[in-house]
Image (cartoon, rainbow, N blue to C red):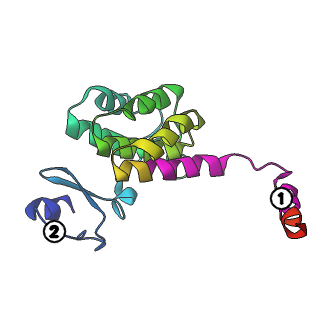
Amino acid sequence: MDEIMSQHQEFAVCPSCENPNLRRLDENSWFCLDCDWDNLPVIPNGDHDDILASLRHGDLHSRRIAAQALINIGDADRHLATATDTKVLLEALDDEDADVRYFVAVALGKLAANGSLGKLKQLARDDASPLVREGAKTAVEQITNREPQTANREPQFADRDTRTLNR
């Protein structure tokens, strides 16, 4: 797909899935927000120090690629990260590039990194990029939906509904 995309500098839809959700990473690289997630490499645990270094110190293209790759730390079914990984990802939420911030937010959501909720909520509200705001909002939802449900939650909703009906 990269060969197709680099040959056609301007197009309206992804040549693979025909959806318009494309992001230009640089003059020769594109990322489809609909179909490219499945094509990201799986990174074995403990085998991503170079990627973390690129996220911290790389040029713009390297930071974007590293942020994308870190979405799949672990394996396809279990997204695993160490405390160091999460720290680097949290730092990268302040990257000057909106695409890097977006991919990092998505990675944190998939990793269910509870420690990132405050920063993700801030980005969901305040980031200048609509894409980053949407990615951060989705990440917050992913993290909060993974938190254990309390046993009393259902009766509390029932009580509230009863009080509303009795007014």
Which residue is drawn at the image coordinates 39% and 59% (left, top)? Answer: 38
- Residue type at mark 1: give it: Glu
Query: Mark 1 and mark 2 in contact (Cβ < 8 Å)?
Result: no
- Give percent across and percent down for residue 110: 51, 47
Q: Which residues are magenta?
A: 135-160
| Distance between mark 2 and mark 1 Cα atoms | 49 Å
55 vs 163, nearest the viewer = 163
Asked if 53 appears above or below 66 in the picture, the reply is above
The numbered mark, 2 or 1, whose residue comes first in the sequence reads 2
Q: Which residue is mark 1?
A: 154
Q: Is residue 134 left or right of residue 109?
A: left
Query: Hey, which quadrant is residue 12 in on the image?
Result: bottom left
Asked if 37 appears above or below 162 in the picture, the reply is above
Foreground disc of the pair 2, 1: 1
Query: Hey, which quadrant is residue 54 in on the image?
Result: top left
Decide whether residue 149 is among the magenta residues: yes
